[in-house]
């Protein structure tokens, strides 16, 4: 099932848009989660997430850069595949930081730092950015 989700995410990710990939990041906690974030040059993004208990979630929307801060905003509501849940926006002004080859999501509540560091610390896979 996990392999199916990865293959599906790869297919959907490549067919999602004709826009050029600016950055692609991947990470998670091995054995528990897999997270991929693709940022496109037109300020859109494509996000896939697999958690061993919740199943998978696919999201897309816009990313914005406000000076030195980056944010994600979902364009539609989503649900997890393996649990019954109310549709929700995966990201609403979700801040993230890019430093070197690492992308880290910034939790809105400081008590979530450990969880975010374990599950949402991503590493660059590809980059088309010209610095």
Image: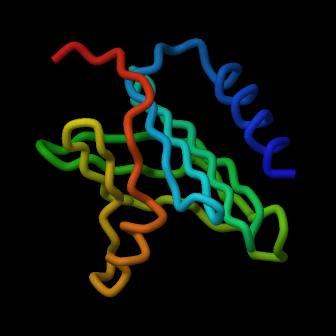
Side (left or right) of 43 relative to 68: right
32 sits left or right of 38 in the view:
right
Q: Residue at x 64, y 67 (%)?
A: 88
Task: Kindly identify the residue that appears in the image at 79 percent across and 35 percent down.
Answer: 8
Here the colouring is rainbow
* Residue 82 drawn above or below residue 91: below
Number of marks present in the image shown: 0
Q: Is residue 127 above or below residue 96?
A: above
Find the residue positioned furthest to the left: 67
Q: Position of residue 95 (x, y in %)?
A: 31, 57
**Picture quarter containing residue 85?**
bottom right
| Residue at the spot 65% in from the left edge and 62% down from the top edge | 31
16 is higher (above) or lower (below) than 116: above
Q: Position of residue 110 (x, y in %)?
A: 27, 82
121 vs 68, left or right, is right
Q: Residue at x 49, y 42 (%)?
A: 26
In the picture provided, is 127 more to the left or to the right than 48? Answer: left
In x, y percent, where is residue 50?
68, 57
Q: Position of residue 64 (x, y in %)?
A: 31, 41
Nearer to us in this view, 46 or 123: 123
For the C terminus, give its image quadrant: top left
Indicate the quadrant where residue 5 lies: top right
Please identify the quarter of the rendering in which residue 120 is found: bottom left
The residue furthest front is: 31
Q: Is residue 28 above or below residue 54?
A: above
Relative to the observer, which residue lies in front, 61 or 50? 50
């Amino acid at each position: 099932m996990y392999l199916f989700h990865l293959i599906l995410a790869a297919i959907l990710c490549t067919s999602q848009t004709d826009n050029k990939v600016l950055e692609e990041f991947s990470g998670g906690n091995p054995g528990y989660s897999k997270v991929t974030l693709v940022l496109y040059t037109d300020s859109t993004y494509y996000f896939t997430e697999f958690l061993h208990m919740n199943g998978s979630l696919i999201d897309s929307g816009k990313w914005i850069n406000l000076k030195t801060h980056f944010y994600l905003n979902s364009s539609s509501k989503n649900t997890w595949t393996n649990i019954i849940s109310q549709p929700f926006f995966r990201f609403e002004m979700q801040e993230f930081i890019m430093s070197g080859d690492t992308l880290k999501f910034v939790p809105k509540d400081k008590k979530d730092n450990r969880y975010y560091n374990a599950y949402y610390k991503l590493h660059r896979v590809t980059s088309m950015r010209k610095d």
